[in-house]
Image: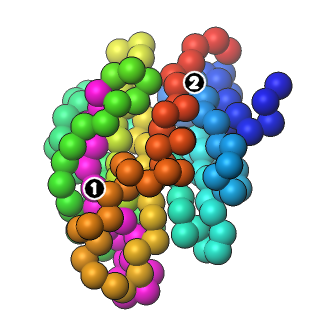
Amino acid sequence: MNLTMVHSTPSEAWNQKLPPIGFSLDYSGTAMTVSKFPESNCYLRLLRPPQGSLEFVVKSYRSETYNHNTLKDLIREFGLEIGSSVKMGRTTTIRVGGIDRRTREFVTGNGLSRKKWLAIIIPSPDGGPYGLLVMFGLYIGSNGSGKRVRISENPVFKKLIDSFQLTGGR
């Protein structure tokens, strides 16, 4: 078994009262710490010290729809969860597991605590009214607007998202 692979099975998720969606990813070479099911509604959180200068989060969502408005609402909910303002950025698509997925950039925090994020919405492979909200955050601090920061070009993000796969099984 590869020790730098994280696997989450549908049955593990179900036991945590999350939608039964399985996935895996390879975090080798990222220098990130891994927490599976660290809080309610969260499958996975990877952090790079100090204080999460890089962060990769996989959360669940429940919705009948799958579009940019759904993604925007989920980002706002995330801002409320972490007690931060949210400034929405551009929308794009990115290829995850061989499929183009909807994404949106956004910024949380103020001053030195600002972080730029890229959020990806992945609907349930079984067609259920739920899915995954995958987010990658990068500390940007108080310098500049963060507009020049392209999270999708970050090598750690690329490594994680290129290895991210939905999986079946128990």
User: Which numbered mark, 1 or 2, is in the foreground of this view?
Assistant: 1
89 in relation to 161, above or below: below
What's the residue type where badge 2 is placed? Gly
13 or 148: nearer the viewer = 148
Q: Is residue 162 left or right of residue 153?
A: right
Q: Any magenta on residue 51?
A: no
Q: Decide if residue 89 is in sight here.
A: yes
Callout 1: SS:
strand
> Which residue, given by chain and number where applicable, does mark 1 sit on?
105
Considering the whole magenta stretch, tell me its main secondary structure: strand
Q: Is residue 115 covered in magenta? A: yes
Give whichever of 51, 162 is nearer the camera: 162
Colour mode of the rendering: rainbow
Query: Mark 2, residues whose alpha carbon is within 10 Å: few (<14), some, or many (≥20)?
Result: many
Residue count near mark 1 (Cα–Cα under 10 Å), binned few <14, some 14–19, many ≥20: many
Q: Contact, CB < 8 Å: mark 1 with mark 2? A: no
Look at mark 2 in the image and give the residue it sits on: 22
Q: What residue type is disc 1 on? A: Glu
**What residue sits 25% from the left and 77% below the top?**
145
Image quadrant holding the C terminus, namely top right
Left/right of residue 136 with respect to residue 80 in the rendered view:
right
Q: Is residue 85 above or below residue 111?
A: above
SS under mark 2: strand
Q: Which residues are magenta?
A: 100-116
Residue shown at the point (60%, 45%) measured from the top left: 44
Q: Residue at x 29, y 71 (%)?
A: 146
Q: Quadrant of the N terminus?
A: top right
Task: Tell me residue 159's x, y (percent).
Answer: 54, 42
Q: Nearer the viewer, residue 29 or 37?
A: 29
Q: Where's residue 2, x and y in %? A: 79, 30
